[in-house]
Amino acid sequence: MRYDLDRVPEPIAYKLLAATVIPRPIAWVVTKGKEGLNAAPYSFFNVMGSAPPTIALGLMAAPDRGFKDTALNILETGEFVVNLVPERLAGQMNLTAADAPRGVDELALAGLETLPSTHIAPPRIAESPVAFECRSLSSVITGPCQTVVIGRVLAVHIEDRFLKDPDRAHIRTDALDLVARSYGSDYVRTHDTFRLDRPTWAGLKAEGKV
């Protein structure tokens, strides 16, 4: 079966992408605008590089009112914090996804405390084990209902108890207990892993595989 995405309705395109590209990490984005603070989760998100440290966010608009507060605040200020979501905060994260009216402080709605950021105005979520302070490098409006924000990571906050060796940035990744999006209302845990050592060309030659 082939789907030509220029020929199918947008909801079909969304289902094809969201149901196949899984798991997707969740960016729990905090911004600050004219009407105050805003927090919302986005799963069209990932790291794009480390020199400079770069992340990308896909922000979809609401069909009835255009860009949501997150996108408007980033386009206005260029600043945002990406918080990662441990399972213990999944319920509160989900609450901040509600279609609240403009200007509602979802952090207060979900009973979340914040800590000040170092380089930017939006705060970070205090209970999140990892937070990235970001400044927008560029924003590309890819359609009437979406924009892609590319941000430079200015600082990474990691809760001390998750660091094995701070000097070498060795992290107890499994202990972070992060969740990711699957499809629809389903989420996945990040504990079910397996290991594959990356091959080297010299090793493949030594094994007679090339």
Image (cartoon, rainbow, N blue to C red):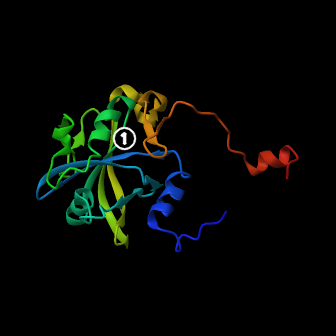
Mark yes or no: residue 115 visible.
no
- Looking at the image, is 161 positioned above or below residue 202? above
Q: Nearer the viewer, residue 156 or 143?
A: 143
Q: In the figure, is residue 30 to the left or right of 104? A: right
Local crowd size for mark 1, using a 10 Å CA cut-off: few (<14), some (14–19), many (≥20): many
Residue at the (29%, 61%) spot, across then down: 62
Q: In the figure, is residue 142 to the left or right of 80? A: right
- Looking at the image, is 116 positioned above or below residue 75? above
- Residue 51 is situated, as x and y percent measured from the top left of the image, at 45, 57
- Looking at the image, is 208 positioned above or below residue 61? above
Q: In the figure, is residue 46 to the left or right of 155? A: right
- Residue 203 is situated, as x and y percent measured from the top left of the image, at 78, 45
Task: List the single residue furthest toward the left.
Answer: 35
Q: In the figure, is residue 90 to the left or right of 124? A: right
Residue at the (40%, 28%) spot, across then down: 162
Number of marks present in the image shown: 1
Q: Nearer the viewer, residue 66 or 73?
A: 66
- Residue 135 is situated, as x and y percent measured from the top left of the image, at 29, 58
Q: Given the image, on which type of amino acid does mark 1 rest? A: Leu
- Residue 42 is situated, as x and y percent measured from the top left of the image, at 36, 50
What is the secondary structure assignment of the residue under circle 1? loop
Mark yes or no: residue 170 visible.
yes
- Looking at the image, is 106 positioned above or below residue 111? below
Q: Nearer the viewer, residue 2 or 72?
A: 2
Residue at the (47%, 47%) spot, across then down: 24
**Rendered-image quadrant of the N terminus:** bottom right
Task: List the single residue furthest toward the right.
Answer: 208
| Residue bearing the label numbered 1 | 84
